[in-house]
Amino acid sequence: MDDGNAELQESISALTSMPVPEHVSIPKIEIRARPAPVPSNSELEAGRVFFAEGAKFVMSVVDAAAIPPPDRPEVCFCGRSNVGKSSLINALTGQKKLARTSRTPGRTQQLNYFSIRDSLYLVDVPGYGYARMPKKIQRRGRQLLFNYLRGRAALRRVFLLLDARHAVTSTDQAFLDAMAESAVPMQFVLTKSDLTNRESTKRTQSRISQAIVDFPSLHMEVISTSSRRMAGIDMLRSTIASLK
Ligand code: GDP
């Protein structure tokens, strides 16, 4: 029996005040973020077909009370301003100007609803943590985001975008901490993977693992993307198609 196991047994014994029989082996629990497995050809094809017609803009809302009725599943994309969210939505839908890619990040404090094949909503939410944005607007954006995230039963998954070079920054961690109580299923998506190499991607992965320890409703599988190179976009399409 290895040391970790012995330690675990001791803690459990202490907790329960009952000795754990020696022959009972308790597996060590290790939480590890890992790259999402490559989907099968048919899963990739399902993703391609699902997004083949692109997306239709439905509406922008500035108040969570005004969002469309939850009559279909939806997924949303959130992350720090400038993380590459607009570029990723444009890459996914094959529409270069669907979500605005701007050089002055963080101006949009609204939820933008897009419809895919009339069967799923894709929601672009305000980016967080843009220091140069006026505090009042930041606060309004944060409020809108959290009201939406906490109260939306149709929300199948929140894709939390992280820059592949920086992984979980303190701003992301603050966002995760604020979301920790909610049961919303989340999954990390790395952006701008073209700007990293294999080694730093590994480092990123382990830093994500640390964030995950404190956040049980996260999916362990991390999808790595580059909108510039169209890398990982097919994988993300097939993941979304599987949620409809
Ligand atoms: P948003 O503020 O999160 O919507 O981010 P944007 O999509 O506007 O992108 C912010 C900046 O990152 C822009 O200058 C983009 O050109 C750049 N960017 C976005 N995606 C990629 C990518 O995959 N690779 C690289 N190298 N740059 C990217």
Image: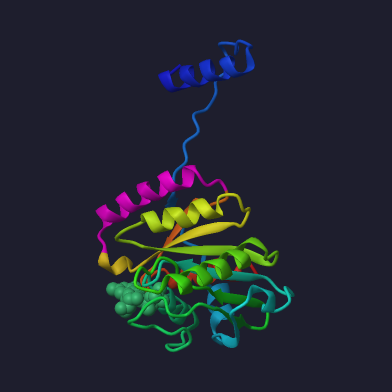
User: Quick check: 156 left or right of 230?
Assistant: right
Q: Name the residue: 44% across, 89% down.
A: 97
Is residue 66 placed above or below 190 in the rendered structure? below
Query: Is the magenta region chiefly helix, strand or loop?
Result: helix
Residue 224: give x, y in percent of width and height.
40, 63
Name the residue: 36% across, 48% down: 207
- Which quadrant would the C terminus be assigned to in this image? bottom right
Q: In the orientation shown, which residue stands out farthest toward the front?
A: 136
Residue in the picture at 33% in, 61% down: 164
Q: Quadrant of residue 80?
A: bottom left
Q: Nearer the viewer, residue 10 or 133?
A: 133
Q: Which residues are magenta?
A: 196-216
Question: Residue 122 at x, y = what percent?
Answer: 58, 76
The answer to whether 237 appears left or right of 64 in the picture is: left
Is 206 in the magenta? Answer: yes
- The relative height of residue 35 versus residue 144 in the rendered view (above or below) is above
Residue 232 shows up from this direction: yes
Residue 84 image offset from top left, x and y in percent:
38, 73
Residue 76, quarter of picture: bottom right
> Residue shown at 57%/19% (left/top)?
12
Closer to the camera, 105 or 45?
105
What is the total number of numbered labels drawn onto the structure image?
Answer: 0
Is 238 inside the magenta-drawn segment? no
The color scheme shown is rainbow
> In which quadrant of this rendering is ligand 1 seen?
bottom left
